[in-house]
Image (cartoon, helix red, strand yellow):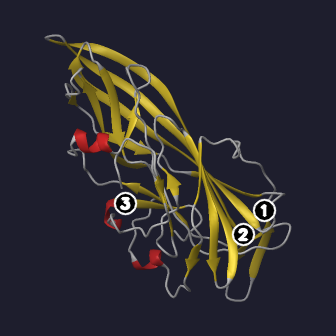
Amino acid sequence: MKKLLASILIISVFSLSLTSCSIFGGGAGGGKKPKETTETSETSEIEYTLPYGKPSHDLGSVDAKETFEDLYIDPIDKPWGATQNLRMASSDVDNYFVYFALDRNNSQINENLNFISTVTQPSVRAYALEDDPGYIVYEVTYDQVFPIYSREPSNVYTSFFSYHNVSFVDYYTGRKFPAINLSTQIDSFGVTGNVFYKGEKYHLGYYEFRSQEHVSSNTESAGDGYVFLKQKLVLHTTSYFIVPEFYRGILMCVFVANDTDTPLSEIMADNSPYFEPPTPFGDEENPDDYVFFGISAPQ
């Protein structure tokens, strides 16, 4: 997973922010009121009707849109997620980030005293759309909390932090949801397309909205013209997945490996928005570097 940049809105001369995500697996439709089925034994089922609802955001007013090419899914013998020994989470997850303070020559001039950030346990809301029978929406909200603690000169030209954004992968195929990398120009996106499975055609929608909150900030003298900077920043994210009503395969994945030694030049090179198609997870990633949440997939 690529490292991303996010701006420190209060103290930056310029801002840099990015994001990445991804995925999909089968689906089905039909019926005006989608029903969710829970198996209680081999012979009995309990059915309940999902309520109609509306997204908290306007899905028609995203900053960037993309359509992925028709995706054909082969019949699945054994789900990808069942073969990977995935580490599943049920509470907040800590991971790593790096804060950078630069001079006018783009040289780092600070010493980081904290590298640990937190991804909060996602909250999931499922509901049906009146104008899209046979499909349901998973509305996923979570925060990424960045407690910045840095020793740096009292005068800094610009500052930002790099981190790994949360991503999403299909439990059944191991494909990442297609996504657009967020940048300084966009804070939301929408990706749609068609998936073919067992001769049937289904549509998929994935939308993401993100905002930044500056919670607190203070400085203390560190002597010799330096200060200790303490800031708390939170990225609020809401993701939407419009999928066939019987599809249960969304995994949220959090990168937890320590790569805080990644060179700044390499991080800066990724500072651009781009479309990522539904590629297989693991081509460039190691599942052992991630912790997973079951959004609508087996825990």
- Quadrant where the image shows the N terminus: bottom left
Contact flag, marks 2 and 3 (Cβ < 8 Å): no
Inter-mark Cα distance, 3 to 1 = 31 Å
Q: In this rendering, is residue 159 above or below 279?
A: above
User: Is residue 102 shown above or below 292?
Assistant: above
Residue at image mark 2 = 245
> Could you tell me which secondary element the residue under label 3 belongs to?
strand
Q: Are marks 1 and 2 in contact (CB under 8 Å)?
A: yes
Q: Label 2 to label 3, Cα distance in Å? A: 28 Å
Specify whether 154 is left or right of 24: left
The mark found on residue 50 in the picture is 1
In front: 94, or 139? 139
Q: Amino acid at mark 1?
A: Leu
| Quadrant of the rendered image containing residue 105 | top left
Residue 56, how many percent across, how many down? 70, 43
Q: Amino acid at mark 2?
A: Glu
Residue 4 shown left or right of residue 34 in the figure: left
